[in-house]
Image (cartoon, helix red, strand yellow):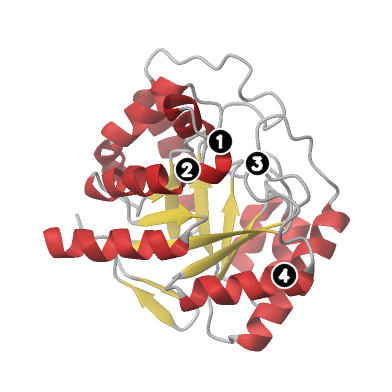
Amino acid sequence: MLYNAYTIGKRKFTFDNPYVMGVLNVTDDSFSDGGKYNKVENAVAHALEMINDGADFIDVGGESTRPGSGGISADEEIDRVIPVIENILKEKTEVIISVDTTKSSVAEEALKKGAKIINDISAFSFDPKIVDVVKKYDAAYVLMHMKGRPKEMQNDPYYDDVITEIYDFLFSKLKELEVTGFSKIFVDPGIGFGKRIEDNFEILKRLEDFKGLGYPILVGASRKSFIGKTLNLDVNNRDTASSIIDSVAIKNGANVIRTHNVKNGVQVCKLLKELT
């Protein structure tokens, strides 16, 4: 299934091939690279490296959403992400920046400064005003499924039918967004967000089911704990396994892979293009 093309910034996305979103955590406590890019100059240098490696989007996150994280204030999140956005765009005016936030005030400041996508893990349930902000700036929006909140989401999550429950949740949320006139939406089944190990693998195996929602699918499995627990790997040694997972995700319908290792992600996309 080919989706309608999206124009984001000055670029047209046709979804006939998969795209790569590079992860840029400007946090102290993210599960993979917390503290590594919390200085503006380090964050910008890493963003430029990912752009040079072929990233289609840079996803900037100022608040950790790892299991057990408690959150920060909007002001602190703004202080973390806005200087990074400004300095990336100073270096590369055409880059498409996504901001990983659940807060309407953070989204507003980021979009004002030139971000083009809001990646909201809460599916606008934490701060419904975020919908109005995204609409105001004609931004793209990532709608993700999560059970619970990051602080407690991995405390014994349970599903009778994980695919049906995620599908129904996303379907319901999409209907709410469509009424507002939203058009540039990505759906994300939320691997690792309130999911058991077996749930994550079931999502990947049945990813194609989510094509029925009618929107491009984004998958963020990079370095997540279900990989580490399955293979007994610490977070610094999960990139090869993450590439394998991304390959399966693309083969099963993912249109965007969100990854810490952009170089690997781009290679995966190029190889799979030759194999189709």
Relative placement, left or right, of 244 versus 237 is: left
Q: Closest to the observer: 243 or 114?
A: 243
Q: Picture coordinates of residue 241 (x, y %)?
A: 39, 42
Which quarter of the figure is the N terminus placed in? bottom left
Q: Which of the labelled discs sits on residue 238, or is there none?
A: 2
Establish if 221 lies above or below 129.
Answer: above
Within-10-Å neighbours for mark 1: few <14, some 14–19, many 20+: some
Indicate the quadrant where residue 107 lies.
bottom right
Mark 3 or mark 1, earlier in chain: 3
Q: Picture coordinates of residue 262 (x, y %)?
A: 45, 63
Q: Amino acid at mark 4?
A: Asn
Q: Picture coordinates of residue 208 (x, y %)?
A: 25, 40
- Is the Cβ of the residue at disc 3 closer than 8 Å to that at disc 1? no
Mark 4 or mark 2, earlier in chain: 4
Q: Which of the labelled discs sits on residue 234, or is there none?
A: 1
Establish if 3 lies above or below 71.
Answer: below
Mark 2 or mark 3, earlier in chain: 3
Relative placement, left or right, of 135 versus 261 is: right
Within-10-Å neighbours for mark 3: few <14, some 14–19, many 20+: some
- Is the Cβ of the residue at disc 1 closer than 8 Å to that at disc 4? no
Question: Measuring 42% from the left and 80% from the top, which residue is drawn there?
Answer: 11
Relative placement, left or right, of 13 versus 74 is: left
Q: Amino acid at mark 2?
A: Arg
Establish if 138 lies above or below 241.
Answer: below
Give the structural element (helix, strand or loop) at label 3: loop
Q: Which mark's residue is nearer the viewer, 3 or 1?
A: 1
Alpha carbon distance from label 3 to label 1 = 11 Å
Which quarter of the figure is the C terminus placed in? bottom left
**Residue for badge 4:** 42
